[in-house]
Image (cartoon, rainbow, N blue to C red):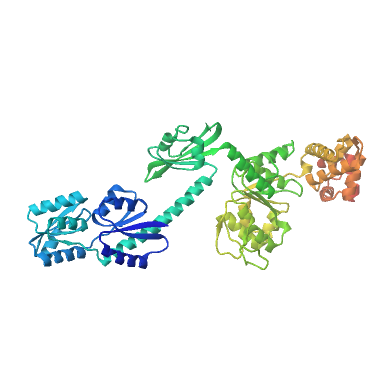
Amino acid sequence: MINAIVCIPYLELKEPYERCIRQYSDSDIRFDVRHVIGIREALEDAVENYDIVVARGITAATVARKWPSKHLIEIELTGYDILNAIIACKGRYNPKRIAIVYAETLRCDEAMLSYLTGIDIVVRKISNEIDTESAIMDSVSSGIEAFVCGRTGATICDANGFHYASVEVGKEAIERSIIDAVTAAKTMEYERSKSVLIRQLLDDNADGEIALDAEGNIIEENSVASTLIGPGLGNIPEWKDALKSHAGIEKVKIINNLPCIVRYIPVFHNDKAIGVNIIIQNSESLRESDSKIRKELKDRGLVARYSFNDIIGESSRFREMADKARRFSLVQSSILITGETGTGKELFAHSIHAASPRASEPFVAVNCAALPGNLLESELFGYVEGAFSGAVRGGKAGLFEIAHRGTIFLDEIGEIPLDVQSKLLRVLQEKEIRRLGDTRMRHVDVRIIAATNVDIKKKVRDGAFRSDLYYRLNVLDLQLAPLRERGNDILLLSDVFLSRYAAKEGRRKPSLSSEAEELLLSYPWPGNIRELRNICEKIIVLFDGDIISGDDIRSIISVDDGSIGASEISIESLALSGIVKKGALAKELGMSRTTLWRRLKTSNVKQ
C-alpha cells in the first residue's frame, strides 16, 4: 500500500479533492487530504509518514528542498488559473501594475499576460515565506498596486492592507495531480514488489552476491555476502582490477577460514564500466550442491555409470578404438558407434560422456528398438496435456528435454521408424523439439551419441534409414572391434570376470589351463564380451576345482550353442573359397589344427 498526502492551501479544496480521489483512486494508494501551508510544523509532521506528497507553491518547494527522497506531485497551475486571478484583481481594484508573487516553479509569460489584460504585469518568484514577504514589500516600494499570489502571500497582504487576489486551484489541476499520484503509486508498488522479490532471490541464494558502483560503494548485497565478508571490502580488494578488465577475474580466497571462489564481473553501459558484480561461492556449499545434484541424477538413472577406467584391454585394436573415443569425448559433435552385439557400445557411450565437458549434466540412454514408433516419439519429444488418449495431466517432458545440456544415447538407432527419423533430424539441425500436440518449439542443447549393430549403410541404400540423418549422426564414427579380433584381451577379460564372479559367490578364483586358454582364444565369440562374461559366470557356478580344463570349456560352449553359431558362415565361406588345407585354414583363422577339426566337424563343412 502506498500512502499519499494532499496538502491543500485552503479548506475549500477539501471537498473537490476528496471527490476526485473517489473517482480515480484504487487499492494501490491511500490518500489523506490535509490543510497545510508553508513550512509550519504541521507540514513536517504530515510529510514524514507518506510516500507521495501532493502540494503547490511554497509548500511544494519546501518539500522538494527538505525531503528530496519523497515523491512530489506538484499541483501545477494553468495559465487559465493565473489569468482568472488577474481578471479578479483588475475587477476589484483596477490597478495599473500587478505583481504575480508565486513559487519559483511557476511558468508564465508576463509579456503575454500584460498584452491580454492591458495591465503592467511583473513576476516575482519566491521559495519560502521570508522570500514572499520581501518580494511583496519590495514590489510596493517599486509602485506595484496589487498582487496575484498564493495563500502565504494573501496572509501577508491581509496583514499589511495590500490589495490582492488569490490564485485558485481549478478542476483541471486537481484532476491532473490525483491522476499523476495514482500513476506514481502504481509504479512505486511495482518497484517495491520487484525489490522484495529480488531481495528474497538474493537472500535465498547460497552464493554471496555484491553489487558495487565504479567507486567501490556497495549498492546491494545479500545476507550470505554480509555474513562472509562483514563490513567493507577488505577481504576482496581485486574489484578495482576487475573494473579495468573486460573479461572479469576469478580468484580462490580464504574468507572466514573457508576456501571460496570469488568472481568479479565488470558491468558496462555504453562501453563504460559502471560497476562490478561480485559472486562469492563457498567451496563447501559447492561440494554439497554438486553432491545433491549428482545424487538426484543418480537416483533417476541420469548419470554415466561407467568411465574409461571400466573399459579393459591391451591389444592394439583396443588401444586404437579407446584412444579414438577419448579424443571424441573432448568435442561436441555427434557420434555413431557401430559394432556387433556385446562389443561394449553402451559402455563406450557412458565413458565418452563421463570424460566430456558435459560430464556433470544428465546422461539419458534409450533403447530405440524396445519401444514401438508412436511410444518412442512421445518418449523422445514429450507431449502436452490432451495430446492423445492416456496423456498424463499437465503433459510430460521428453528425453531430449531431460537431457538438456547433457548427452542422449540412442541405442539401436537403426530401428527408428522413418517418421521419427525426420523429427530426430530436426533436433540435430535446429536444436529444437516440439512436444506432441504442442505448437511451441523448445530449444535443447544436447549431444547425441547413437549406436547400432546392424549394417546402417545398407539400410540407407535400401531406403529404410534417411541418408541425411545418417550423415548428421555419423560426424564422428567409432567402430568397435569384435572380441575375436582382440587377441589376448580375451584372456585379460576372462581373468577380470572370473575374479568378479568368484568374489560375488564367495569362492576362490580358478585358473585356466593352457588348453582352456587356447579354446577361449580360438572361439569366435558371436556374443562378444557379453558372451564371455556369461561363460565366466557359469564357470564359477558349475566348477569347484582350482583349474579349468579344456573339457570344462568345451562343455560350456557346447551347452551354450550346440554349434559354433555365427562363425559357421566365415569358416564355410573360407572352405568353399578354396582354402581347404587344414594348416592354411587354421592359420587364417588363428587357431590350432585340432580346434579347426572340431569346428569343421560341428559346422558340417566337407573336409
* Residue in the foreground of this view, choosing between 474 and 574: 474
Q: How many marks?
A: 0
Q: Residue furthest front?
A: 159
Q: Is residue 531 left or right of residue 279?
A: right
Residue 217 place in picture, x, y as percent: 40, 39
* Residue in the foreground of this view, choosing between 456 and 580: 456
Residue 596 vertical position relative to residue 27 in the rendered view, above or below: above
Q: Visible in this render: residue 378?
A: yes
Residue at image position (55%, 31%) is 257
Q: Is residue 514 left or right of residue 114?
A: right
Residue 115 vertical position relative to residue 541 in the rendered view, above or below: below
Q: Is residue 155 left or right of residue 248?
A: left
Q: Is residue 205 left or right of residue 512?
A: left
Residue 20 place in picture, x, y as percent: 33, 66
Q: Visible in this render: residue 471?
A: no
Residue 347 place in picture, x, y as percent: 71, 45
* Figure quadrant of the N terminus: bottom left
Residue at image position (56%, 54%) is 431
Residue 266 place in picture, x, y as percent: 43, 40
* Residue in the foreground of this view, choosing between 551 and 132: 132
Quadrant for residue 79, please give it: bottom left
